[in-house]
Image (cartoon, helix red, strand yellow):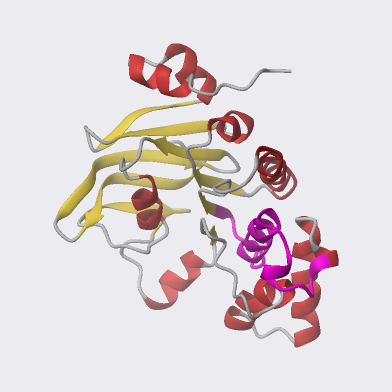
């Protein structure tokens, strides 16, 4: 593993009950990079993400975040690790009865003892970062799907995590809204230094944002290749990987 790794996945076996979906998975994520987890349907993309954030306990292997095991940590040690990460799920998972401001400030209520006005100020700052401060008092049903995704990202970064995990952030979005979300991810990465781990199958987004791609293979229950999207497209050893990366390559400006 490289010295600048913020996440280390070590010999990870992942699955549910007695079903093994991934086996012997090893890779790292470098600090401040945008890493995309890619692969065909059923290859284990979301399963890997859920194990990386500690949602499921693997039967074998480990996941280290800034050198600390999220697999073996308990109590306050686990909470300290979880404070370093933020998660935004495919649906956005906003509470429909709460305004965008109330949704974003919720983690502050749960994990800090800040006074109410300070929570409101921080929440509005995060909404401003994603271009939604004018909509702070709107309910999720009153804004578009793309705005809901951005509000979910604002909530995920309200505690200033070092790593942000995104599960299918572009799912259900039109191409223009998806491109706007890609631009937001790049801006947050460059301006705040946030490390991103993104599960997606949207090739235009991958070429737009990814520094590296972890390509999973359902047949081998593991990693087929790791590299930049351009390197996988042009020079991957296996032809199917190159074909996969050539499906919807956007034109370069």
- Relative side of 249 to 21, left or right: right
Quadrant (top left/top right/bottom left/bottom right) for the C terminus: top right
Residue 77 x/y as whole percent: 42, 71
Q: Which residue lies furthest to the left in this view?
A: 18
Q: Position of residue 111 (x, y in %)?
A: 58, 79
Q: Can you say whether 174 is above or below 110 in the image?
A: above
The residue under the point 47% across, 65% down is 81
Is 143 left or right of 50, judged from the image as shown?
right
Residue drawn at 63 percent across, 49 percent down: 194
Q: Is residue 106 above or below residue 58?
A: below
Task: Decide: is 167 above or below 4.
Answer: below
The question of residue 155 being in magenta is answered with yes
Q: Report the number of numbered marks.
A: 0
Residue 158, relative to residue 131: is it above or below?
below
Residue found at x 61% / y 63%: 156
Based on the displayed image, in which of its 4 quarters is residue 132 positioned? Answer: bottom right
> How far across and how far down the image is residue 138, in percent?
76, 72
What's drawn in magenta, residue-wise?
Answer: 135-164
Residue in the picture at 63% in, 57% down: 149
Residue nearest the viewer, comparing 7 with 234: 234
């Amino acid at each position: 593993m490289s010295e600048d790794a913020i996440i280390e996945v070590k010999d990870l076996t992942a699955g549910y009950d007695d079903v093994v979906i991934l086996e012997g998975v090893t890779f790292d994520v470098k600090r401040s990079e945008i890493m995309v987890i890619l692969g065909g349907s059923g290859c284990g993309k979301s399963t890997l993400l859920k194990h990386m954030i500690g949602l499921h306990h693997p039967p074998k292997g480990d996941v280290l975040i800034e050198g600390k095991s999220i697999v073996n940590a308990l109590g306050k040690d686990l909470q300290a690790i979880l404070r370093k990460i933020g998660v935004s799920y495919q649906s956005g998972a906003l509470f429909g009865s709460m305004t965008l401001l109330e949704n974003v400030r919720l983690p502050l209520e749960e994990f800090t003892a800040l006074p109410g006005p300070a929570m409101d100020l921080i929440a509005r700052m995060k909404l401003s970062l994603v271009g939604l401060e004018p909509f702070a008092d709107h309910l999720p049903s009153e804004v578009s799907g793309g705005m809901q995704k951005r509000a979910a990202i604002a909530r995920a970064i309200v505690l200033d995590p070092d790593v942000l995990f995104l599960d299918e952030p572009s799912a259900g979005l039109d191409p223009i809204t998806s491109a706007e979300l890609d631009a937001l991810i790049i801006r947050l990465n460059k301006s705040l230094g946030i490390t991103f781990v993104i599960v997606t199958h949207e090739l235009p987004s991958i070429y737009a944002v990814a520094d590296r791609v972890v390509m999973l293979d359902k047949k081998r229950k593991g990693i087929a290749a790791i590299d930049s999207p351009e390197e996988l497209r042009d020079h991957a050893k296996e032809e199917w990987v190159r074909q996969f990366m050539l499906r919807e390559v956007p034109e370069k400006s």
